[in-house]
Image (spheres, helix red, strand yellow):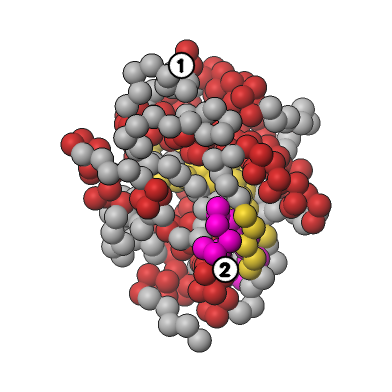
Amino acid sequence: MQELNGSQRRVATVFPPEVGKLAVVTASTSGIGFEIALALSRAGADVIVTGRHSADGHEALARIRPVAPEALVRFEKLDIESQSSVADFACRLSKAARPIDLLINNACTLVLLKRAVTVDGFELHLATNFLSHFALTARLLPLLRASKQPRVVQLTSTGRHHGQIHLDDLQLENGYTPLKAYSQSKLAMLIFGTELQRQSDERRWGLMGNSAQPIGARAALLANATEVTGSMGWYRRALGFVPEQLQGSVLQALLGTSEREELLDPAARKSLADLIGPAVPEALDMRVLDPAMGRKLWDVATELTRVEWPNS
């Protein structure tokens, strides 16, 4: 049996049971996405590991299966930069028709020095960190609603504190900077999480939406980030190490499992900040809680991604 490292052992021993549940984790062949997939697998959940490359997926499965032999873990290709890949992925899962209990929108692009666009013409940070997850959640909503207690988790970042939603230039065609693009996308992710809960409550979708901003974990996104200097260098330093942070308590809070459920009550309107130490609630500012901004961003994202949300 494959030997676990220290952080994996801690996660495995304290993570509560998830037996019989199906979880989808975006960008989970490495980094924090992999750690979450591993923890869920060891807790008994069936996990769909996703990523761009099949070789990375098979390598992740080879690491997970020996230490989580009871879990059903499989890889599905998902290029989160591409709207067609998101649609194809959702179509494959819809054909299988198995309810999804947990969707973790984890994939992220970090502070690209030069502005880049996806095949769909979207600014890369906005597409990867927000628009594709917005579309993925919409396309998987029927499978989520088929679950008894569906949960959707948005992974945001402390970088969102610098963020501003530029509705007049969401693609940042003018005045692009790495910090502006990254922080806008992560703020948009958190606004989406809040608005998703609001929409679910109004339309009775039955979702529980959580948000978290884990820092201090090895991040796969660093492999795809360009070298950055000056004020942006701290992102790489902050995210490039693995302290004792990927504890079971952090993942419990992140995933909304039993013992930390009180931290994730949507009525409390709190996200989770994991900087150095255990996960704690964090109050949200009015940029996130403003229903008018939430609705505007929701409508713009719906138009851009061309997805449909059920009324009831």
- The residue lying at 28 percent from left, 59 percent from top is 241
Q: Is residue 154 visible?
A: yes
Residue that carries the numbered disc 1 in the rendered image: 169
Q: Residue furthest front?
A: 119
Mark 2: few/some/many CA within 10 Å (<14, 14-19, 20+): some
Which numbered dot is residue 117? Answer: none
In the image, what residue type sits under mark 2?
His
- The residue lying at 34 percent from left, 32 percent from top is 114
Q: Nearer the viewer, residue 114 or 263?
A: 114
Using the image, determine if residue 304 lies above or below residue 274.
above
Query: In the rendering, at what x and y percent does residue 252 appear?
Result: 49, 59
Q: Is residue 161 visible?
A: no
Q: Quick one: SS at disc 1?
A: helix
Question: Is 275 one of the magenta-colored residues?
Answer: no
Question: Residue 118 vs residue 146: left or right?
Answer: left
Q: Quadrant of residue 301?
A: top right
Q: Mark 2 or mark 1, which has the lower sequence index?
A: 2
Q: How far apart are labels 2 and 1 at the CA level? A: 40 Å
**Residue segment shown in magenta:** 40-58
Query: In the rendering, at what x and y percent does residue 185 appear?
Result: 44, 32
Question: Residue 26 vs residue 74: left or right?
Answer: left
Residue that carries the numbered disc 2 in the rendered image: 58
Q: Quick one: SS at disc 2?
A: helix
In the image, what residue type sits under mark 1?
Asp
Q: Residue furthest bottom?
A: 1
Question: Residue 193 vs residue 207: left or right?
Answer: left
